[in-house]
Image (spheres, rainbow, N blue to C red):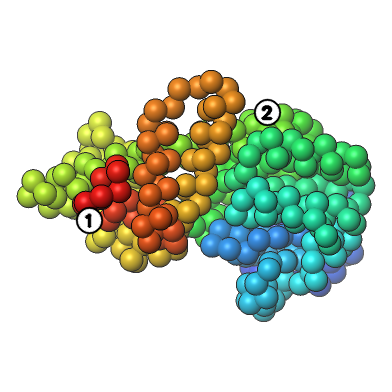
Amino acid sequence: MATFGCAIASAGKYACRSLLLSASRSTLPTKFIGRYASQVGFIGLGNMGTHMARNLLSKGHCIVVYDVYPEAMTQLVDSGALIAQHPADMAERCDRIITMLPSSPHVQEVYAGENGIFQQVKPGTLLIDSSTIDPSVTKDLAIMAEKRGAVFLDAPVSGGVLSAKQGALTFMVGGKESEYEAIKELLYCMGENVVHCGDVGTGQAAKICNNMALAISMIGTSEAMNLGIRLGLDPKMMSKILNMSSGRCWASEVYNPVPGVMEKVPSSNDYQGGFGTALMAKDLGLAQLAATKTSSPTPLGSLAHQIYRMMVNSGFPHKDFSSVFLYLQEGHTFNGRK
């Protein structure tokens, strides 16, 4: 879905200066001028965040970036991004800020820590957290934002690095309907699906449920592919059978875990890039915490969490989560012994 705001810049990359000049000449409808003349902040330029920020730039947004690694910021300067000294500096300069961070402690530090966003946030600022964190932390930060006159929404994403690069992410948004309406146009510049899940925190709830299902299906696909290969089946043929039969799933069709079966996926690049095993273990931990709080039975989710935790302790933390195929192929069992 392309909104007017994204479409005006899709023919080329507009620098902030040219966009502001266009606005001053009234080439944009009045309702868009204030929104597009202001700067958007982006914090967290990892595997996903860098591509998300680049998509905002390519759609004509003026962005200010911050990351703890200076080189992550400087690589976006040539594309037109500005650099903030710290999150509080960004809050002083931007009225919309997106955060894309690894875990709950990172998000808490960026918002509520020393030189955090809440130190300088302006009333009316829209704070959009696309990290995957504990829903209870999201709700606490929303309360803190409200006390400062700002609005905090959770908008975690699904789709992986390739979708982030292509601007094809799915956003799961938690917040009031009016707040969702205020940010969805911005999110459509980075994704193709933007879904309102309910009140603040429900975006995170949807994301951890999705990732639990993803982890389980990735393990199941890896087990089936490994068994088929050991039975003498060609892996590409095995993948074809799965994808034209009832075993088809995202892990088999889009993100096959076997090296060489698909191009442009981590399994064919020594499991580099993509979504790290340590991050998957973290998300599964969040799902298990939520399951405990709600007395929800998740036996397969619990086992998936155990497997990914063992992988983290077996030299796989920075490999893509699809490396569970390699972990199983090497003969690891549930008790960690060959």
Question: Circle 2 sits in a helix, a strand or a loop, which is it?
Answer: strand
For the point 52% across and 35% down, which residue is it? 287
For the point 83% across and 60% down, which residue is it? 114
- For label 2, the crowd category at 10 Å Cα-Cα, with few meaning under 14, some 14 to 19 and many 20 or more, is some
Residue at the spot of label 1: 330
Q: Residue 113: x percent and y percent?
A: 80, 56
Real-space Cα distance between discs 1 and 2?
Answer: 43 Å
Question: From this viewpoint, is residue 210 visible?
Answer: yes
- In the rendered view, would you say 268 is above or below 243? below
Question: From this viewpoint, is residue 14 visible?
Answer: no
For the point 25% across and 45% down, which residue is it? 333
Question: Circle 1 sits in a helix, a strand or a loop, which is it?
Answer: loop
Q: Residue 263: x percent and y percent?
A: 31, 61
Residue 88 relative to residue 293: left or right: right
- In the rendered view, would you say 211 is above or below 30? above
Residue type, mark 2 in image: Gly
Residue 69 relative to residue 143: left or right: left
On residue 198, the disc is 2
For the point 47% across and 47% down, which residue is it? 281
